[in-house]
Amino acid sequence: MADIDQPSSFGTVKYHDNGDGTYSQQVYAVTGAGSNSTQIQGASADSDWVTEDPLLCGAEVRTIVRNYSNGKKANLGADGEGNLLVSLATVLSQSLDSVLTYPRGSNYTNLSASAQVLAGAGKLNGVFCASTSGGTLKLWDSLAGSGNVLVNTFALVAGTSYDFRHARVGTGIYATITNTADITVFFDPTVT
């Protein structure tokens, strides 16, 4: 027997012939009561054959990995926290893709007084101020507290992260700290 579309007061119901004398039921559109909005819903099971083009949305919490064959429907998966599970099906290039350029994360150094952070070209990623008492910070693209100013003097606030979006430096990074401050500078030397 063929599939049957049955209009109803709450939307369209599709009765799918399962081929074994049974039918599965799928609701395609439901008009929201009093709101004049349309919701898309479906009763199709995960890994079921897709026979139409229903709008599939939402995610199912998954604790096991499933394998699917061509033509099968796959629900979105979520972890126990509700985060969408995704898989990158593209091969990345270490020379082109920044996610692989620094796979170890940033280098860092902790300072409580003015000092050289990096000698040579690289990137300034950020600064975290753990504590301060009226401390200020000035960052230089140099090997000493002179020359090219990278970030001019600013007042530090305890418990604050400052993101510098991988600011490039050509000579190095030097940090000038005034008064009292405990900071950590995050950086990456240029990879050749």
Image (cartoon, helix red, strand yellow):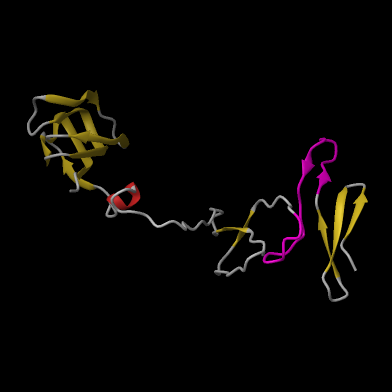
User: Closer to the camera, 117 or 41?
Assistant: 41
**Residue 171 part of the magenta segment:** no
Q: Is 83 left or right of 160, judged from the image as shown?
A: right
- Magenta stretch holds residue 38: yes
Q: Is residue 42 above or below residue 9?
A: below
Instruction: Label the magenta part by its dominant secondary structure.
Output: loop
Give the mark count: 0
Residue 6 x/y as whole percent: 91, 54
In the image, residue 162 lies at what x, y percent? 30, 34
Quarter of the figure with residue 150 = top left
The furthest residue to the bottom: 20
Q: Quadrant of residue 173?
A: top left
The range drawn in magenta is 29-52
Residue at position x 24%, y 37% in the image: 131
Asked where in the image residue 34 lies, by quadrant, the reply is top right
Q: In this rendered view, identify the residue nearer to me: 138 or 55.
A: 55
Image side of residue 136 versus residue 103, left or right: left
Question: Quarter holding the N terminus?
Answer: bottom right
What residue is drawn where x is 76% and y is 51%? 41
Q: Residue 124's spot in the image, x, y percent? A: 23, 37
The structure residue drawn at horizontal position 54% and vertical position 69%, both measured from the top left corner, is: 65
Q: Position of residue 186 (x, y in %)?
A: 23, 42
- Where is 146 relative to 173, above or below? above
**Would you say 24 lies left or right of 8 here?**
left
Q: Reply above or below: 59 against 172.
A: below
155 on left or right of 117: right
